[in-house]
Image (spheres, rainbow, N blue to C red):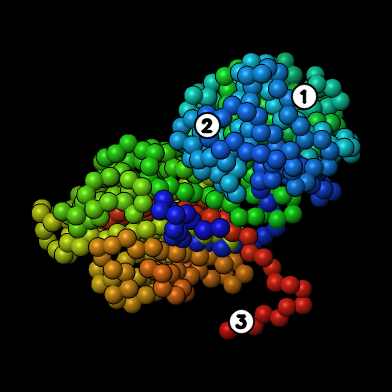
Amino acid sequence: MRAVDKKGGWVLVAIMLCVASAHAVTILNKTTGQTLLYEDFESPSGVCTNSSDTADYYPDNPPIAVGTWQPYEYSIGNKIQVCSYDGDGSSAPAATLQGTNCLRIYRESGAQYMEFIPSSPQTTSNDVIHLETMVWLPNSAPTYAVQIAFYGPSESDYVANVISGDSGSVLGYDGSAWQATSLSWKKKTWQKWEIDYAVSNETFDLTIDGIKETLPCSSSPSAVHMVRLRAGSNGATVFLDSTGYDGSRQNDLILFRDGFENSSVDSPPAVESADIGSYLYALLSIVSSKLNIRTNDKSVVGGPTQAYSGSGYLELYRNPYDDSTVSFANCMFAGGSVVPATLGIRASFLLWRSTDDYNPVATTGKYIDSIPGHGISKGTTKSLLTDGVFLTYNIIRYDDSYDGYKIGPGYQNVAPTNTFPKGSWVPVEIVWNPEKEESTVSINGAESLVNVLVGSVPDVLDRFVFAPGNGPNLYWIDDVEVEWVYIKPPPAGTVILLN
């Protein structure tokens, strides 16, 4: 899967990893390895193609269902829809993480849910039953918007029962009352929810975006007879999508995407404004006005006349004489961190460099030249010198060459002078391949070159970072995407010769 920009083309910055995992709502017995349900919403009988369509479109053809996967709607106003349209990022998600479809559950009144009943109850003590799904809640989400529950032999036997509370809180039911957890939910962004319950145990684990908390069972320990994903209160809308894991392998999954169309102009991107993923800002001092969404003509300072596609693009600025203008944009992955030892990741963006001449002494006047920095990481560029934090970190030099940072020797040349032109939107593609333990980079559509690794491969990665670099800096980016990529292993008996 490649990043689709707003013109219908693509640009890419990639990291590639190899492992076994998959998509959508996934329920499996981790102990036996059996996938009980895998629903990616990509093969229904019909789909909702616009937000004004009020018909039901049930997910009726899951790739794997060892049991019954069915909807329940209490009232005629309730809706369950497999949707194939991109929303506004506020009332509906602006993009799906895999494929083209996701599931919308709307509750007008009464109970409203999707229900899975395994053909055989999961009764073996200590077998771990695992559920994972991506959850998106709109800006108008009420208290108790989404609820996920494992049931014992009857509807009153809640083995595990969690719900979104008010003000971002997540609650677990302990058998007598809803209790607060340390976890949190967010509006307008995809989050990964997971439940792990060992049959007949007195506790279960709830994990949101990689952060786990152990909670007490909601009733007496039991087998797992049923699982429900509910809109938890009247007026609630819940969107569900795949995590990319089907129980056997991790398939392609978008981790971050933004075309800068959902934030206020002349302001930094809002934390949850990305189409997929979110933002985390790291500033040497709190000056938010130096990282802004633009829609106007910036040619007076050597910038673009317009976005590469759509109307919005992001401007990053640093005045080297004022460290308060140093800011980093951390593009955080939806669902939390990923493991680079097993799967491939791709990330992509367009970058425009100012055509104004470099002036090392001027403090006013021209915005001069830029030295943009960017990399794949689990921390900000302030931790660049710490081994095991950054996978790659690259900068563009004044002479249009392209360097990569390596702990010890410092910056190493990756591409020669005159590689990265000023005054145009330039696509960049960065790829990580764990099989080869190698990163490559392609600039402006040219052949891929071997990139530099910062140091040891980090244990996890959770962001793509855009940074001011080392010097006077003004540049612009558009159409950013990072993708988790399944690398198909070679056929059995294949001999691979490495140079």
- 1 and 3 marks in contact (CB < 8 Å): no
Task: Give the CA separation, mark 1 to mark 2.
Answer: 34 Å
Q: In terms of depth relative to the viewer, which is nearer, 117 or 70?
A: 70
Element under disc 2: loop
Residue with the mark numbered 3: 498
Number of numbered discs visible in the structure rendering: 3
1 or 2: tag closer to the N-terminus = 2
Residue 308: where, in percent of width, then height? 34, 54
Residue 153 falls in which quadrant of the image? top right
3 or 2: tag closer to the N-terminus = 2
- Residue type, label 1: Tyr
Residue with the mark numbered 1: 158
Can residue 148 be seen at all in this image of the molecule? no
Q: Which of the two discs, 1 and 2, sits closer to the camera?
A: 2
Q: In terms of depth relative to the viewer, which is nearer, 48 or 335?
A: 48
Instruction: Determine the residue positioned at 66% across, 33% down.
Output: 57
Residue 51 is labelled as 2
Instruction: Determine the residue positioned at 70% across, 26% down.
Output: 113
Task: Give the CA separation, mark 1 to mark 3.
Answer: 54 Å
Instruction: Determine the residue positioned at 76% across, 32% down.
Output: 70
Residue 371: where, in percent of width, then height? 28, 62
* Residue 292 located left or right of residue 111: left
Query: Can you say whether 76 is above or below 46 in the image?
Result: above
- 1 and 2 marks in contact (CB < 8 Å): no
Q: Label 1: few (<14), some or many (≥20) within 10 Å?
A: many
Query: Can you say whether 265 is above or below 72 in the image?
Result: below
- Residue type, label 2: Ser
Residue 108: where, in percent of width, then height? 61, 18
1 or 3: tag closer to the N-terminus = 1
Element under disc 3: loop
Instruction: Determine the residue positioned at 78% across, 46% down.
Output: 64
- Residue type, label 3: Leu
